Image: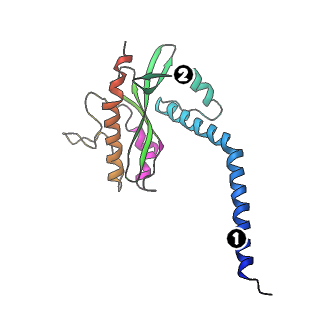
Amino acid sequence: MKQGYLYTVVFVLVAAVLFTAILATAQTVLHPRIAANQANAEKAAILYVFGIAPDDFDLESLFEQYVSTTQVNGLEVYIYADQAGVKNYAVPFTGAGLWGSIHGYLAVSADLTEITGLEFTKQSETPGLGSRIDEVWYKEQFRGIKIADAVPVFADQSGTALVDAVTGATSSSNAVLQIVTETIEKRVSQLEVLLP
């Protein structure tokens, strides 16, 4: 028996309503868990730039124990301190990548003279090429760069590389250097009010 067009239209409409209801219910039920996971990812990123690698079990306790926040001219600043005093400051950044915005955190030493960490929380660079900026080897090479001596570059005047670019992803690598430079100039410079 052949079904008519009306049957097909009704079937598609019923299926669309059913699956829309399922997705809407799942979104509503899982929203608190999604928000909690996003908050934990942000906390883990902040701890990473401070050189702390927590596991899922001690993330909250480490964050509460060592990290505090303050506002400087409307900029949210994360402070890493232990019993000996302030160790690092971290600031959020957003900048233009090749295909979209790159978001993350940059940490500097308490005296604002050295980069101590870099982490990306959101990026949409080319998979397998530009997205390699999120690999540990790339981010770790920024630790220890002196801010006063030079802004991070692929090579200085002597030809010595300060930062290795991602092969095949020159635009993404240049974007990261631009973002780091702008963050140092526009955000880290505001932290001078926190110096003793």
Given residues 84 and 43, the one toward you in this image is: 43
Quadrant of image for the N terminus: bottom right
* Residue 122 is inside the magenta segment: yes
Residue drawn at (70%, 80%), measured in percent from left and top? 5
- Which amino acid type corresponds to the residue marked 2 in the rendered image? Tyr
Asked if labels 2 and 1 touch by Cβ distance under 8 angstroms, the answer is no
- Point out which mark residue 12 bears: 1
On the rendered structure, is 122 left or right of 166? Answer: right
Residue 165 visible in the snapshot: no
- Which amino acid type corresponds to the residue marked 1 in the rendered image? Val
Q: 109 above or below 129? A: above
The stretch of residues the image draws in magenta is: 121-143
Q: Position of residue 143 (x, y in %)?
A: 39, 33
* Residue 35 is inside the magenta segment: no
**For numbered disc 1, what is the local secondary structure?**
helix
Residue 166 visible in the snapshot: yes
- Residue under label 2: 66
**For numbered disc 2, what is the local secondary structure?**
helix
Rounded to the nearest whole Å, what is the CA distance between mark 1 and mark 2?
Answer: 55 Å
Quadrant of image for the C terminus: top left
Q: Point out the residue furthest to the right here.
A: 1
Residue drawn at (69%, 52%), measured in percent from left and top? 24
Residue drawn at (36%, 29%), measured in percent from left and top? 187
Residue drawn at (35%, 40%), measured in percent from left and top? 179
On the rendered structure, is 145 left or right of 45? Answer: left
Q: Position of residue 63 (x, y in %)?
A: 57, 26
Q: Residues within 10 Å of mark 1 (few under 14, many from 20)?
A: few
Q: 65 above or below 41? A: above
The mark nearer the N terminus, 1 or 2, is 1
Q: 26 above or below 180? A: below
Q: Position of residue 123 (x, y in %)?
A: 45, 47
